[in-house]
Amino acid sequence: MTTTRRSALGLLGASGALLATGAGSASGVTPTSTSADVRAIDQFVKEQAAQDQFSGSLLLLRRGRPVLARSYGRANHAAPNGPDTLFAMASVTKLFTAVAIAQLAQAGKISYTGTLGTYLSGFPAEIADTVRVHHLLTHTSDLGDTFTIPGYLAEALTWTDVDRVMNGTTDYIRRTSLAFAPGAGSRYSNAAYHLLGAIVAQVSGKSYYDYVREHVLRPAGMTTTDFYTRPHWHTDPRIAHPYAKQPSGGRADTIDQRLYVGTPSGDAFTTCADMARFALALQGSKLLDRVYTGITLGGKVPPPQPPGPAPGVPPVGFQCYGPVTLLVRDQWVTGHGGGAPGTSTDFQMYPDREWVTVILSNYDYDGGPPPAVVKTRDVLTA
């Protein structure tokens, strides 16, 4: 597949001319002066793309500088993926929500030990009085997955208004009940992160979307990241369409199976370069002060465990306030992944070795993270 070739240095606003365009090449910084590790990752992703096992963009930073950028596959029927292509983020969006909560906590407007009922009304007492912000952030509230609430998805797909998506989703979550006491177990919860976004809106007096734009995206210098609507997804050539794997073995565009707009739990849209900016802003205490950056990125509880073996997932890790931090060999790796039909995303920071990796794909994968994610992590922690 043919893509353009550009300099990731230019994407991040650093000096450096655009590289020449070559037919059949992937966009990105050529690893001329980088290690064999980077070349190994480059070759692996190239082979995956040649086998149509990867479609998307990859960006690696070392000590704040791009060392590898590649784009493969097609964003839609008319355009290839490139460095400016926007991808649905799936659950990596939760990082924006977590930072927004931390900012309000830093300002003294939210307490991590505050109950849900302190900030939002309409919940039964067993939830309002026992679920705390800490539980919502660490997936220990037992509120579960919004998309499994009976009737939710069928109705939510009919909504065509941003406020309806936010308020309607909150209303459905109000109907749920708890199977275990908050803090007594862990269960991955899109519902919890949606409620965190509702808390951001209630406490700040702004919509969740406006708050994140003004206090997270803009300060981080994220110039194109936003919560684009489904009509935008259909018509904006910059946005990669989600090509979901079908039982027949082929792939189909599944835009119409996604909500009208993403929520605090998933599906903002971003580029690799913008996520690199987010990493640098977060690590550089531009979004939070040093204390609250540490609070957000520090491990709190063991993360929710999959029901069975998960290929490529390290056995030792902790849920932070938003990210997950994993111990891979002797290296801590902190970030978040995401997945949905036609979407696989991964954002990781390697503080000990000063790497940042961003992998955004408009393909989905069975049985765990995309092979490119596993390979990148294995190489960088070897």
Image: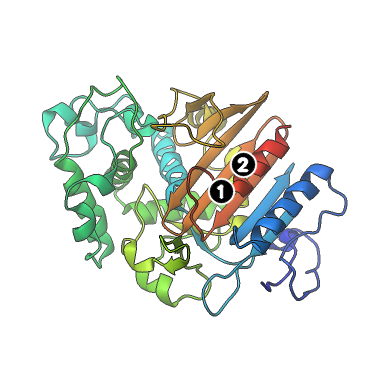
Category of crowding for the residue at label 2, using alpha-carbon neighbours closer than 10 angstroms: few (below 14), some (14–19), many (at least 20): some
What x and y, as percent, mark residue 9? 74, 59
Q: Is 209 placed left or right of 269 in the picture?
A: left
Q: Is residue 14 above or below residue 380?
A: below
Q: Is residue 203 above or below residue 135?
A: below
Q: What amino acid does circle 1 point to?
A: Pro
Is residue 318 visible in this depiction of the protein? yes
Disc 2: which residue: 374
Residue 318: give its label. none
For the residue pair 214 and 45, the one nearer the viewer reads as 45
Report if the CB atoms under discs 1 and 2 are less than 8 Å apart: yes
Q: Secondary structure at mark 2?
A: helix
Disc 1: which residue: 370
Q: What amino acid does circle 2 point to?
A: Val
Which quadrant of the view contains residue 196?
A: top left
For the residue pair 250 and 272, the one nearer the viewer reads as 250
Picture mark count: 2
Q: Quote the CA–CA distance across marks 1 and 2.
A: 7 Å
Which quadrant of the view contains residue 306?
A: top left
Q: What residue sits 61% from the left and 49% below the top?
A: 358
Category of crowding for the residue at label 1, using alpha-carbon neighbours closer than 10 angstroms: few (below 14), some (14–19), many (at least 20): many
